[in-house]
Image (cartoon, rainbow, N blue to C red):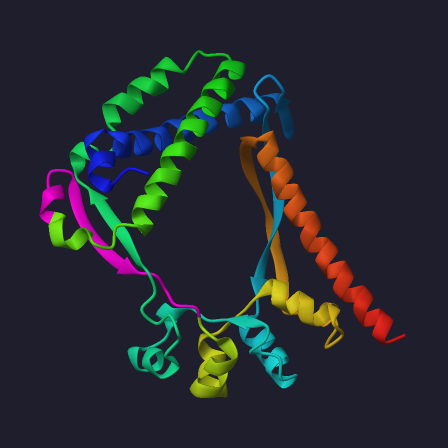
């Protein structure tokens, strides 16, 4: 893996930003084509790419009511998460997680010369305006592959540049360099004890997966939990991805459903 200076001097950082914007342009054009032909899903087998519209239900959540419901059953700490930034400094000190100092992560703010060029992007829009959709898809895939490689390198640099501050003036021609601490992992049960019930209740957030798992274990009916949400509409999102990525996402979903099924079967086995 290369270091920060090499990544900047070689133009790879600017290339990363440019690729991101170019992929946005291509994705929008491909989406518009798909809307025009009225297909919710299209596979471009030549490039192993799929474009699809997926509908999601949008809910209005009664979070306060759900917290009360879970707390009444003594399950709030095991069904909730906490964000470090939602705690006061005093509370953060009280909790004293083992990895309180977290990990240093590079934060880089590029100067204008290292942004993706607006003129180049406008020119790119014009150049791709009359291209056939199959060519747009092929170009998107090429750029996606290059972007993925560069992003992996950049992510590594961000996690492995903790000594950078001593020489940050070297980067002044490219942008501003600083370090931020990653949030520590919070022991939620300990937080419940140390913060107290009411304070914990005010800052915690019920986690959907944990809530489902506890319901499957028979502590309450999932139907009761669903009473604390109200559907307010349907939102459609457009996804453009490599077909192997779609397969991976589908496998993750199936594994989650399988885990839920195993939990339910185990409970039924113990409570005939």
Q: Classify residue 128 as left or right of residue 7.
A: right
Q: Classify residue 245 as left or right of residue 14.
A: right
Nearest the camera: 130 or 7? 7
Q: Is residue 203 above or below residue 175?
A: below
Q: Residue at horizontal 63%, vertical 69%?
A: 228
Q: Position of residue 156 (x, y in %)?
A: 35, 45
In the rendered image, the quadrant that contains the C terminus is bottom right
Please say whether residue 128 is visible from this viewpoint: yes
Q: Is residue 139 magenta?
A: no
Q: Residue at horizontal 71%, vertical 58%?
A: 259
Range shown magenta:
169-185
Farthest right residue in view? 272
Q: Residue at horizontal 26%, vertical 32%?
A: 14
Residue 9 occupies quadrant: top left
In the rendered image, the quadrant that contains the N terminus is top left
Nearest the camera: 129 or 51? 51
Q: Position of residue 43 (x, y in %)?
A: 63, 24
Q: Is residue 112 above or below residue 251?
A: above
Q: Position of residue 161 (x, y in %)?
A: 26, 50
Q: Is residue 182 magenta?
A: yes
Farthest front residue in view? 1
Please say whether residue 39 is visible from this viewpoint: no
- Counting every numbered tag in the picture gives 0
Q: Classify residue 174 as left or right of residue 228.
A: left
Residue 207 occupies quadrant: bottom right
Q: Position of residue 229 (x, y in %)?
A: 62, 65
């Amino acid at each position: 893996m290369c270091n920060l200076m090499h990544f900047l001097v070689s133009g790879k950082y600017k290339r990363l930003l440019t690729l991101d914007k170019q992929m946005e342009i291509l994705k929008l054009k491909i989406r518009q084509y798909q809307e025009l032909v009225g297909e919710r899903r299209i596979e471009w087998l030549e490039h192993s790419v799929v474009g699809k519209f997926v509908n999601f239900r949008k809910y209005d959540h009664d979070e306060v009511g759900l917290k009360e419901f879970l707390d009444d059953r003594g399950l709030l700490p095991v069904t909730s998460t906490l964000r470090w930034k939602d705690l006061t400094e005093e509370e953060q000190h009280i909790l004293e997680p083992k990895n309180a100092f977290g990990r240093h992560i590079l934060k880089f703010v590029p100067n204008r010369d290292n942004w993706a060029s607006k003129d180049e992007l406008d020119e790119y829009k014009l150049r791709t305006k009359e291209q056939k959709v199959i060519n747009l898809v092929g170009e998107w895939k090429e750029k996606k592959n290059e972007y993925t490689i560069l992003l992996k390198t950049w992510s590594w640099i961000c996690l492995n540049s903790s000594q950078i501050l001593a020489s940050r003036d070297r980067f002044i021609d490219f942008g501003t360099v600083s370090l931020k601490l990653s949030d520590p992992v919070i022991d939620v049960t300990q937080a419940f004890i140390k913060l107290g019930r009411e304070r914990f209740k005010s800052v915690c957030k019920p986690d959907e997966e944990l809530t489902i798992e506890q319901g499957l274990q028979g502590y309450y009916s999932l139907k009761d939990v669903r009473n604390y949400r109200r559907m307010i509409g349907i939102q459609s999102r457009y996804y453009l991805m490599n077909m192997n990525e779609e397969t991976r996402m589908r496998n993750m979903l199936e594994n989650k459903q399988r885990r839920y099924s195993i939990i339910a079967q185990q409970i039924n086995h113990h409570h005939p």
